[in-house]
């Protein structure tokens, strides 16, 4: 049974919301709570996506080398290549040139082996997180001791490096032509893969959000705010500010790499030009600023408002082609840019401003205040 167009649109909005929520929460940890101006988010998002493009297909073929399938391997490599692959070893060696044929054969196998598909999904997400943490470490190491604008420029430059490598180095993710991914949700059948993929994205987004909430309510969260507000004071109290900032970047990078991996698995393909700094660095910054920094609820509000509004504009903008005096291709960018300017002018703290951090639960604080007021003075 085919899903109606409206349902597919809603699932697409929900999936994008989940992916961007993961990224904005990680950015909120880095910038909102720790004060790190991370203008290189595209680095780790693209890193997670490129890993999803490079790993699942090859991993699936490696697993099938250990546990050979019962059916014979027969992969049509296409008219251009003019050959038929009959062994998994050969498929591994020709994974990029014969990507469509290899992926089509893997999809047929994944459709009837849910355990195999779930193993590939889990392994890919874990690998993406580890790769993102590694990218966060190597990108932070040269400039973590820098402050303000200088650190922002270093991270911005780092964000462009991997995209350029992915675009020019074909064995990674197909270079300029991109690469198709195995449909790890093929076992769901047809368009229902979008339901399963969206559910997975939202589940991971919920886990990341809860992790961020626990983090900022802990003593470590209060230390992050202290570093953001006054590094000198934090250092005078014996805190290793440089190490803390580096660890924050590593954790935030791991989280955003998982988001990039999920997005690639959802779309079913990777091409380097998709992962540009506008979509994966500047838009998350707009969401955080709209919602309110140092506030996870604000990150959720800003992301929800941005994604829903932008998708509605994209969905309906063709109907405005004869009304607006410019090409409707730029409509969403112009409107959202205007919204950002208005928010910065009239509500710079965002939709939901930062709240003071409580060292104790509200109930316990009220009880202590009440006890101190009723205690007789000597």
Image: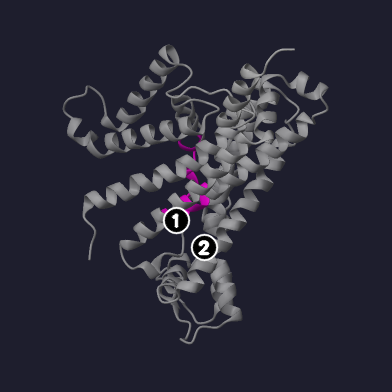
Residue at 36%, 28% (x, y): give it: 333
Residue 121: mark: 2
Residue 126 percent across, percent down from the top left: 60, 57
Residue 295 percent across, percent down from the top left: 52, 29
Residue at 59%, 53% (x, y): give it: 128
Which of label 1 and label 2 is nearer to you?
A: 1
Lateral position of residue 347 relative to residue 64, left or right: left
Q: Which residues are magenta?
A: 259-280
Front position in the image: 293 or 60: 293
Q: Is residue 275 magenta?
A: yes
Residue at 33%, 34% (x, y): give it: 310
Residue 206 percent across, percent down from the top left: 48, 47
Residue 327: mark: none
The residue that disc 1 covers is: 200
Front position in the image: 336 or 164: 336
Q: Is residue 376 visible?
A: yes
């Amino acid at each position: 049974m085919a899903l109606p167009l409206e349902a597919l649109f809603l699932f697409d909005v929900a999936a994008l919301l989940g992916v961007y929520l993961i990224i904005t929460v990680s950015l909120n940890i880095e910038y909102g709570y720790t004060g790190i101006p991370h203008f290189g988010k595209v680095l780790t998002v693209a890193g997670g996506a490129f890993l999803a493009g490079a790993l699942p297909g090859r991993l699936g073929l490696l697993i099938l080398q250990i546990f050979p399938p019962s059916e014979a391997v027969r992969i049509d490599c296409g008219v251009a290549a003019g050959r038929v692959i009959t062994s998994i070893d050969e498929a591994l060696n020709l994974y990029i040139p014969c990507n469509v044929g290899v992926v089509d054969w893997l999809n047929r196998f994944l459709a009837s082996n849910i355990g195999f598909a779930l193993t590939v999904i889990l392994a890919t997400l874990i690998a993406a997180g580890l790769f993102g943490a590694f990218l966060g470490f190597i990108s932070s190491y040269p400039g973590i001791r820098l402050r303000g604008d200088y650190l922002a420029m270093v991270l911005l430059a780092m964000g462009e490096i991997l995209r350029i490598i992915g675009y020019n180095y074909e064995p990674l993710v197909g270079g300029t032509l991109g690469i198709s991914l195995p449909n790890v949700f093929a076992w769901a059948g047809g368009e229902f893969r979008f339901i399963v993929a969206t559910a997975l994205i939202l589940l991971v987004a919920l886990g990341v959000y809860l992790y961020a909430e626990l983090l900022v309510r802990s003593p470590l969260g209060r230390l992050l705010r202290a570093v953001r507000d006054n590094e000198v004071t934090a250092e005078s109290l014996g805190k290793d500010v440089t190490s803390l900032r580096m660890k924050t970047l590593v954790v935030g990078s791991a989280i955003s790499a998982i988001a990039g991996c999920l997005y690639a698995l959802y779309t079913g393909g990777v091409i380097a030009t998709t992962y540009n700094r506008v979509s994966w660095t500047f838009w998350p910054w707009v969401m955080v600023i709209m919602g309110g920094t140092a506030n996870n609820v604000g990150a959720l509000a800003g992301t929800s408002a941005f994604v829903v509004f932008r998708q509605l504009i994209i969905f309906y903008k063709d109907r405005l082609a004869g009304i607006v005096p410019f090409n409707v291709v730029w409509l969403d960018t112009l409107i959202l840019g205007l919204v950002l300017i208005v928010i910065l002018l009239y509500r710079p703290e965002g939709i939901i401003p930062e709240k003071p951090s409580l060292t104790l639960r509200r109930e316990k604080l009220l009880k202590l205040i009440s006890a101190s007021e009723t205690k007789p003075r000597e």
